[in-house]
Amino acid sequence: MKTINLLNYAHDNWVGASGGLAEVHSAVTGDVVALTGSDGLDFKAMLDHARNVGSPALRKMTFHERAWMLKDLANAIMARKEELYELNYATGATRTDGWIDIEGGAGTLFSFSSKGRRELPNQRILIDGQMEPLSKTGSFVGQHVWTSLQGVAVHINAFNFPVWGMLEKLGPTLLAGVPAIVKPASASGYLAEHAVRIMIEANVLPAGALQLIMGGVGDLLDHLTLQDVVSFTGSAQTAMKLQSHPVIARESVRFIAERDSLNASILGPDAGPGTPEFDLFIKEVAREMTVKAGQKCTAIRRAMAPAAHLDAVQEALSARLAKAVIGDPRQEGVTMGALASQAQLKSVREAVATLAKSARIVSGDPETSPVSGNGAFMSPILLRSDDPWGSAAIHDVEAFGPVSTIMPYRDLDDAIALANRGMGSLALSLFTFDQKVAEEFVLGAGAFHGRMVILDRTSARESTGHGSPLPVLVHGGPGRAGGGEEMGGVRGVTHYMQRTALQGSPTVLSSIVKQWLPGAPKPEGEIHPFRKRISELEVGYTFATESRTVSLEDIEIFAHFTGDTFYAHMDEEAAKANPIFDGRVAHGYLILSFAAGLFVDPAPGPVLANTGLENLRFQTPLYPGDSMRVTLTVKSKSVRNEEMGEVRWAVYVYNQKDEVVASYDLLTMNVP
Ligand code: NDP
C-alpha cells in the first residue's frame, strides 16, 4: 500500500498540515501507510465556519430533508465501499470485521434516515410529549419542544471502528440539524478520512456541515460554548481529561462519553453443559473475543458461570478458541486479524500482565506472536479467576484485545453482584431459558448496564448477538462506561437539541409547533377535508358532523353482526351490576364505526387509506337513546414522498350533553 498523505477538511477545503506529521503503520506489516497531522489549522475559525455557515444551512432544512441527505450519504458509502474495504485490511481487520465497520456504518445512516422520515415531522421543531393543561379554562397551556442546538458537534472517535464510530454519531447529529467536526483516532484515521472524502464528494452536504481534523485538536476545546456538544469515544483517562477542561465545565458543554467497559456475559444457573444455552454461551464468548481481535467496546471481558460448570466452560471455550485462524486478514480462511497497532499490542500485553497477577492464563500466550513479521498479532487469551471477589483487576482493567476472564458465581445474587462490580457497562448478556432468572437479573443489574441481551434457544438464531450496538437501541452505559448515551433512534437525535418548556395560549403554541393543540382555533369551511390534498389542508381545519341517535337495536345488530355479545352490551342486569355502567352501553367499536360513518366523505379523492388510530380513550359511556356527533380536526400533516403523506386527525365524539364520549388520533395516508 502506498503511503497516504492524509488531509484535513476545513472550511470546505482539503488542507494539509503545515508540519509535525506522524507516521501511521499498518497493523499487519508494520509498514508506514499514512502520514497524519493537523498543525497549522485554525481551530477557532473551523468552529466559526460550522456555526456561521453549516449550522444555519442545516437548521433551515426540515427533519425529512436532513433524513434524505443521510440516505444519500449512506448510498455514497455503499457505492464506494470496496475502496474502504481495501484500506480496512491495513487496520488488521478481516473482511467480516470491515463489514461491521463499513456496511454497519452505512446501515446506521440508513436507519437514521428511515427513522427521521417516519418518526419525525417534516418540520424543524419537534414536540416532546403531550400538551399540559395549566389553567381552568384552557387558555394557558404548556408544551415541551426540541429545537436544534446552534453550535457544533465535536466528535472525538476511537480507533477500533473508524467508519461506524464516525457515522453512528454523524447520523443523529446531522438529523438534528447540527454541523460536526470529526477527529478520528490517528491509528486508523486513514479509513475515516476516506469515508469523509466519499461523503464530501457525494455533494449532498451543505457547506460547513462537516469538517475533519486528522491530528491533535489544538485549542479547539478552548472555544467551545453552551451550544456545542463533545461526543467522545475512547479511554476513560482521555475522557476524564477532556471532561475536566475548564471551558467544558464553565460553559456546561454537553459531553457524551463512551469509554472503557468491563462487559459481562453470564451463563444462567439452569444452563449447564448439554443445554442449548451452554453452547450458545460458549459460541458467543469466543466470538466476542475474536471478532475485531476483541477490540470492541462491547466485547465480553468477564464471563461468569455457576461454579459447578466452570471447568466445562473452560474446556469448551479453550477448544473453540483454538480453532481461530490468526493471520493476515487478506488471506482466505483467516478468522482473526491483528490488533490495530504495536502500541495497542503493548497496552494489551500490559493489561494481561496485570490481570495475570490475580487470575491465571488457561489458554493462549500473550507474549509470543502467533504470526511472524512486524504485525500486531496476538492469540486469544483466556484467563480464569476462581476467586472473583478477591481480584479487583478482573473487574477494573480492560484489556482491549482478544482477552476475557472466566469466573465462578455461587448463586444468582452473587452473579448479579459480580456483573455490577464492573461499575457500569455498555452491554451484558445472559444465557438462560428460565424467565424467572431473566427477570431477577434485569431487576438486579439493569441499573448498571446500558444494554442487556437475554439469549436462549428461541431467540439465538435471529439474535444480533452480545456485541452489536444497534441504531434503534441506546448505546452507552453508566459509570465506567462513561455515563453517555448514543443512538437509540430519535433519542440520539435529541442529544443534539435543546428541550424547552413552552407556555402560552394554545393558539400561539399551535402555530409554533405546526400542530393543532386542544383549545386552539378549529376553523370550519364549506369543503369536506377529505376532498382536500395535504397541501390544501390547514392545521386546525375542522369538520363537524350531524348527530345520530344510537338505539338499543343498533347495539344488538352490532353485537350479533360482529359476534361481540359482551354482557355490558347485552344484559341489562349484569351491566348495572358493573360499577362503571348504569345499564347496557354501546360498544366502543360501535362508537368508532358510527363515528367513521358520520365523518367519512365516501367518494374517491385524496384520502388513500386509514392507517391506524392512536391515543384512543373512551371517556363517557353511550347509552341506548343517546346521540353522538363528531368533530374531525387536522392535527398535523407530513408529506412522505411525491405520492403520499400522512394526516393526523384529532377526532372527538360527543354525546347530546356535549360530554366527550371518545377521543383519538386517526391516521390517514393522503395525496400530497
Ligand atoms: P484514547 O482515549 O487515547 O483516544 C481516543 C480518541 O481521543 C482518539 O481519537 C485520540 O486521538 C483522542 N485523544 C487523545 N487524547 C486527546 C486529547 N488530549 N485531546 C483530544 N483528543 C484526544 O483511546 P485509544 O483509542 O488509544 O484507546 C485506548 C483505550 O480506550 C483502549 O485500550 C480501550 O480501553 C479504550 N477504548 C474504549 C472504546 C469504547 O468504545 N468504549 C473504544 C476504543 C478504545 P489520537 O488517536 O490522535 O491520540
Image (tube, helix red, strand yellow):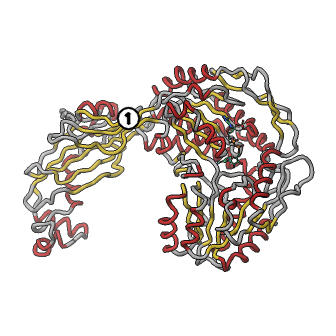
Please indicate, yes or no, whether residue 333 appears anywhere in the rendered image.
no
Decide which of 216, 429 is in the foreground and name it. Answer: 216
Q: Residue furthest front?
A: 390
**Residue shown at 25%/33% (left/top)?**
504
SS label for mark 1:
loop
Label 1 neighbourhood size at 10 Å, few (<14), some (14-19), many (20+)?
many
Residue 415 position by quadrant:
bottom right
Residue 87 percent location from the top left of the image: 78, 40
Q: Is residue 16 above or below residue 291?
A: above
Location of the N terminus by quadrant is: top right
Residue 427 percent location from the top left of the image: 59, 57
**Residue shown at 67%/45% (left/top)?**
235
Q: Is residue 31 above or below residue 392?
A: above
Decide which of 209, 586 is in the foreground and name it. Answer: 209
Residue 251 percent location from the top left of the image: 50, 31
The amino acid type of the residue labelled 1 equals: Pro
Please indicate, yes or no, whether residue 366 appears anywhere in the rendered image.
yes
Q: Is residue 301 above or below residue 144?
A: below
Decide which of 475, 390 is in the foreground and name it. Answer: 390
Q: Is residue 490 left or right of residue 285?
A: left
Label 1: which residue?
672
Residue 452 percent location from the top left of the image: 55, 60
Location of the C terminus by quadrant is: top left
**Residue shown at 62%/73% (left/top)?**
409
* Beta carbon at label 1 within 8 Å of ligand 1: no
